[in-house]
Amino acid sequence: MTANAIDILKAKLDADNFARLQRLGNARLNAFILDSIELCRPAEVMILDDSPEHVRLTREKALETGEELPLTAEGHTVHWDGPADQGRDRERTRYLVPEGQTLSKALNQMERQAGLDEVRGLLEGAMQGRTMIVRFLTLGPNNSAFSVPCVECTDSWYISHSLDLLYRGGYEQFARMGEEEEFFAIMHSCGKMDDRMVSAEPDKKRIYIDHTTDTVYSVNTQYAGNTVGLKKLALRLTIRKADREGWLAEHMFLMGVKGPGGRKTYMAGAFPSACGKTSTAMLPGEEIIGDDIAYFRAVDGRCMAVNAESGIFGIIQSVNDKDDPGIWDVLTKPGEVIFSNILVNDRKPYWLGMGQEVPTEGENFSGQWHKGKTDANGAKIPPAHKNARYAVTLKALATCDSELDNPAGVPLEVVVYGGRDAYGYVPVQQSFDWDHGIVAYGASLETETTFAVIGQEGQFEINLMSIQDFVAIPLGKYVKNNLDFGHKLTKRPLVFGVNYFLRDAQGAFVNGVRDKHVWIKWMELRVHGEAGARETPTGMIPLYDDLKRLFRQTLDKDYSREDYVNQFSLRAPENLAKIGRVTEFHRAHSEGVPEVLFEILKQQKARLEQAQAKFGDRISPECFGKK
Ligand code: GTP
Ligand code: SPV
Ligand code: MN
């Protein structure tokens, strides 16, 4: 088939579309597109380049088909996903592995051929009566060692529109590149849709990833995390590519933090879904490069970082003008925004925690909604979904960093790990060195599950480096790659652990949502040797005087010594129990993990036991010496 795919395509495409494809001259690409056409049987095929006309066409078609509805503000639209399609679907996302292979015990996987038969069976004829749209994009900046070309065939104009907002156009990259260059291919169909243009057969939702051909299949779903293949689906392929090529692909934000004298220090941070990446990267006064996926390469002994994406698919719940003035502006003024799964009343968008009264009726993900409406199980349906989101291009934000598209990336000085850890770690601490940070904060990350993933909320689990769902190599190898990466660097980023979700004995959060700004300012000073620390068994914590000054400077707030003691006291039994769980997890799941991981955990345990013997279960930060 490969040899004459282009001839067969010539008969299936009109002259303009064929010319655009032929210009790319790529046999594997032609074979993939032909396969998509023959399998999904669309009524027509459109090969889009990144021209303004095609971008405009996509926007118009999304409205014309009803996949998006216009809102009052110019450029604003809303898209609905079905009630059973409101987040990433862990259960129905599977990694296909050839018989006899197993990638990682923690990864949701199945036998390749059975998976292909199943998902390709569901895709058969799935695009009948619709247009198949072919889009070319790149992950990472164009013209860069970081660029990963991707092609997505989809029958959704909403997905095509989202791709424009979230990624860099890649048609010219495909035209430039040689035939041997690797690219990722995504085949997606919404499947049968109802009259609200919502995928109607959620039971037949499947998202399968075939790493042997770098291909993703997605069907009977629309939620962007399951369908915009360049997000977490491609991340599972990128992690393997990075493993082969000696770099890192991470679930991390990337930002520039301002320091004294106008300097800027680049930081990246991994928090699980709905645990604060976007809200950190958008802190007022700082500059954002990315909020979800970052790539790192060692170049001349430095860690250079880029954002894989160029837009934001962000959680809208709790976005308000006080805490998030930057994105609030974008969401309330004319400009291109796709809202999803919010409440619409009188063609205006509303969401939970927006700091304004939300109407008692309107349209939401459940259809026509009124206060008190219940679902099939009798549970009250909220006005907007917790995982309602917005899609915007990063350049819409006034604080978008000018280095966003720099093919060389930015020099990284700080790596941060954090999760929803109600009882263990202090709000911020610095590791003793790279290995300690990777092990004690990254590989020990424990978190409560959230609404961003379909399933039960509030379950405690280990989610190493916040990326565990996507790690398509053995977990031990992934940890080793992170450890090794630091050793390739002559100037290693400092590693910090944060915990925005620590609770007191009554269950209340011990910090406010803006406090994170002080923590990152402290990290910035630590990079430049301008703040002190106390050495505790789990890491280096800030001095009260530095925080007091930073709370005043950054938030114009008082910071009392009581707050400091309450937030930064070491909870010895909780931390010891954590080490037990983490050690057990890695013994069971991290095949091939370097022995140094267990050694570092053992040393931390010994330090904790010693401190506990001397000071008791709950140890005031002031018991620990300054360093
Ligand atoms: P994904 O886009 O799913 O990868 O998530 P994210 O990590 O970018 O999460 P985001 O920053 O959008 O935060 C998600 C949720 O965490 C929101 O509902 C916020 O209100 C809440 N949140 C963020 N920061 C804090 C904080 O400092 N304290 C508390 N209690 N909640 C926070
Ligand atoms: C996440 O869940 O980590 C997200 C949103 O960033 S999704 O597109 O679903 O991956
Ligand atoms: Mn994410």
Image: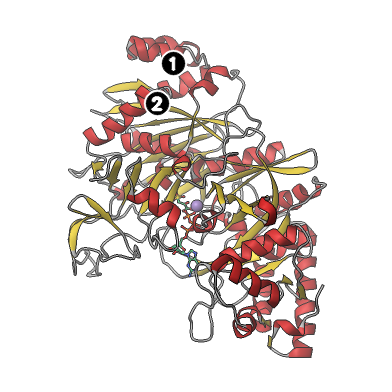
The residue tagged 2 is 134
State whether residue 240 is above or below residue 281. above
Per the rendering, the mark at residue 257 is none
- Viewed as shown, does residue 330 lie left or right of 495? left
Percent x, y of residue 503: 53, 78
Whether residue 317 is visible: yes
- Viewed as shown, does residue 409 lie left or right of 123? right
Classify 10 Å Cα crowding around label 2: few (below 14), some (14-19), many (20 and above). many
Q: Tag 1's secondary structure?
A: helix
**Residue 557 occupies quadrant:** bottom right
Per the rendering, the mark at residue 21 is 1
Task: Kindly indicate whether the residue at mark 1 contacts the one at mark 2 (C-beta within 8 angstroms).
Answer: yes
The residue positioned 39% from the left and 45% from the top of the image is 391
The residue positioned 63% from the left and 80% from the top of the image is 564
Using the image as rendered, state which of residue 164 and residue 158 is in the foreground.
164
Q: Label 1 amino acid?
A: Leu
Label whose residue precedes the other's in the sequence (2 or 1): 1
